Image (spheres, grey):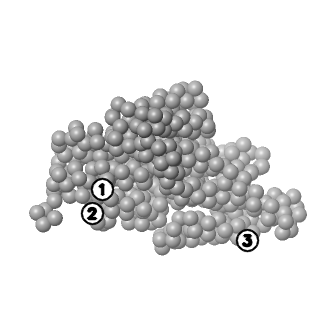
């Protein structure tokens, strides 16, 4: 195992390079510079592994490739969601959601309503990704039209989606954390109420305050009415279109895997476009509606996204999005991130850093703080929440046993550290997915992702107080 000083070299190199990229490229840093930073940092780790630790490069490369395969499902989902967004704009689902959202939700309560809606949908489906890929993109559109800060809207979506995901027995991360810690699913969920409950309540209060504070700066009634008129003019708005997202939610709720559920949503979306948007399709096909022209339009929308050409800048910006090709930059970011994380693990540097952390733990509050800190560190360095959950569980399982703590304390700390903070790291698979899907940079919504920021802090505070830190019984 490499020494701690050696192990920290690629980490410090990455942090320095990422910071410089943000300084030089600002918001464009995630469109190439950060990908190269991750690759160069992986090369630094590989160089140390080969020349200093005398490891076989072929073995390192094999482990890195294994690391990349972990992210392939996320990559596939990302591409399908890109196709789904484009098709759901073409068939009128997204415009209809935005239309009724603008018509029914007052700007002053839009942020807390968005938080509640995303919490309910994510709780029902067990998927924060499905939530942001469906109602999330509609809420972003409504918020933009109302003139509300996109960072605030995205923060409300992220907060609600992750609260519902954490508390849902259908969620993969909510199942993974107790499995790694050695406790039962519903025991784990009940124990998370003590940290997630206060975090979501405080978040709701903050968004209510922000809503009233920003209401004076939102769009005027005439601007909203103009947007509603343009949507009606360009799309067939119908309540029947809500049946499509409902079908997808039912599929996910019935534990249909994400990939086939989203593919079904995309294919059904094409059928809905043909049924509900005949006039729009005819216009986009140049007045000639035959199999070839419709096929060309559908395929272009699926891989290239929907292109709005109403002449209104707000509407065109709102609806010109989606497509598989729009997700390719994020796919590149994820692959580079997994190369870096895989190289750190393959060289033993992650294990060395973890061993150093365990040496400094002397009491329960330190143990929980170390668990959460390590989970966040792994989200930053391995760029994947699943790896962060698994490695944190492995590293600290013995320590919780030594402190005679029930394993549900470990599973809660891992979720409060690994699950909720993954979306706050721009190069993490979750951060990249949410930023790409919503069209809002990670660092833009990060200050307003209140639930995700509060959960780790509340978890550490509760551990320091000693409350809810249940001990193992003698029978256990």
| Residue 312 lies in quadrant | top right
Q: Kindly check if marks 2 and 3 are in contact, taking CB atoms under 8 A apart as contact.
A: no
| Residue 185 lies in quadrant | bottom left
Q: Kindly check if marks 1 and 3 are in contact, taking CB atoms under 8 A apart as contact.
A: no
Numbered mark located on residue 411 in the image: 1
The answer to whether 48 appears left or right of 267 in the picture is: left
* Residue 370 spot, x, y in % from top left: 28, 42
Q: Quadrant of the C terminus?
A: bottom left
Q: Secondary structure at mark 3?
A: helix
Sooner in the amino-acid sequence: mark 2 or mark 1: 2
Q: Residues within 10 Å of mark 2 (few under 14, many from 20)?
A: some
Furthest residue in direction left, as rendered: 474
| Along the line of sight, the residue nearer the viewer: 73 or 81 | 73
| Along the line of sight, the residue nearer the viewer: 412 or 379 | 379
Q: Residues within 10 Å of mark 1 (few under 14, many from 20)?
A: many
Q: Residues within 10 Å of mark 3 (few under 14, many from 20)?
A: few
Numbered mark located on residue 58 in the image: none
Q: Quadrant of the N terminus?
A: top left
Whole-number angstrom distance, CA of label 2 to CA of label 3: 49 Å
* Residue 171 spot, x, y in % from top left: 42, 62
| Residue in the image at 38% along x and 66% along y | 169
Q: Secondary structure at mark 2?
A: loop
Numbered mark located on residue 275 in the image: 3
Numbered mark located on residue 183 in the image: 2
User: Given this view, does label 2 or label 3 mark the residue nearer the observer?
Assistant: 2
The answer to whether 279 appears left or right of 371 in the picture is: right
The answer to whether 463 appears left or right of 216 in the picture is: left
């Amino acid at each position: 195992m490499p020494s701690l000083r050696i192990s920290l070299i690629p980490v410090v190199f990455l942090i320095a390079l990422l910071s410089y990229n943000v300084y030089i490229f600002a918001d464009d840093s995630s469109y190439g510079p950060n990908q190269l930073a991750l690759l160069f940092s992986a090369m630094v780790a590989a160089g140390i592994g080969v020349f200093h630790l005398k490891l076989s490069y072929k073995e390192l490369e094999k482990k890195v490739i294994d690391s990349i395969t972990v992210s392939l499902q996320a990559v596939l989902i990302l591409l399908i969601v890109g196709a789904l967004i484009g098709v759901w704009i073409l068939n009128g689902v997204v415009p209809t959601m935005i239309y009724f959202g603008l018509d029914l939700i007052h700007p002053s309560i839009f942020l807390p309503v968005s938080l509640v809606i995303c919490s309910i949908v994510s709780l029902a489906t067990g998927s924060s990704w499905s939530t942001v890929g469906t109602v999330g993109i509609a809420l972003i559109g409504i918020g933009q039209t109302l003139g509300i800060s996109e960072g605030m809207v995205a923060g409300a979506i992220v907060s609600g989606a992750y609260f519902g995901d954490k508390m849902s027995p259908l969620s993969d991360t909510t199942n993974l954390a107790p499995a790694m810690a050695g406790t039962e699913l519903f025991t784990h969920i009940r124990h998370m109420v003590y940290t997630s409950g206060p975090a979501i309540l405080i978040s709701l209060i903050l968004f209510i305050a922000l809503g009233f504070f920003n209401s004076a700066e939102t769009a005027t009634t005439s601007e909203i009415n103009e947007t509603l008129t343009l949507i009606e003019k360009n799309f067939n708005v119908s309540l029947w279109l809500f049946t499509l997202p409902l079908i997808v939610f039912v599929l996910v709720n019935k534990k249909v895997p994400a990939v086939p559920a989203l593919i079904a949503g995309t294919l059904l979306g094409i059928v809905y476009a043909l049924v509900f948007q005949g006039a729009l399709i005819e216009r986009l096909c140049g007045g000639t509606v035959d199999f070839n022209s419709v096929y060309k339009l559908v395929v272009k929308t699926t891989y290239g996204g929907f292109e709005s050409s109403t002449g209104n800048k707000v509407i065109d910006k709102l609806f010109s999005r989606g497509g598989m090709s729009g997700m390719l930059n994020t796919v590149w970011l994820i692959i580079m991130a997994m190369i870096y994380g895989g190289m750190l693990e393959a060289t033993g540097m992650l294990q060395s850093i973890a061993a150093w952390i365990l040496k400094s733990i002397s009491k329960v509050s330190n143990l929980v703080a170390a668990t959460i800190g390590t989970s966040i560190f792994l989200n930053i360095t391995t760029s994947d929440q699943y790896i962060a959950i698994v490695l944190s569980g492995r590293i600290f399982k013995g320590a919780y046993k030594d402190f005679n703590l029930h394993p549900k304390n470990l599973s809660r700390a891992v979720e409060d550290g690994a699950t909720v903070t993954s979306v706050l790291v721009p190069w993490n698979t979750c951060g990249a997915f949410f930023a790409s899907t919503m069209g809002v940079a990670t660092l833009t919504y990060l200050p307003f992702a209140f639930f995700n920021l509060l959960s780790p802090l509340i978890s550490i505070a509760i551990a320091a107080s000693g409350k809810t830190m249940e001990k193992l019984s003698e029978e256990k």
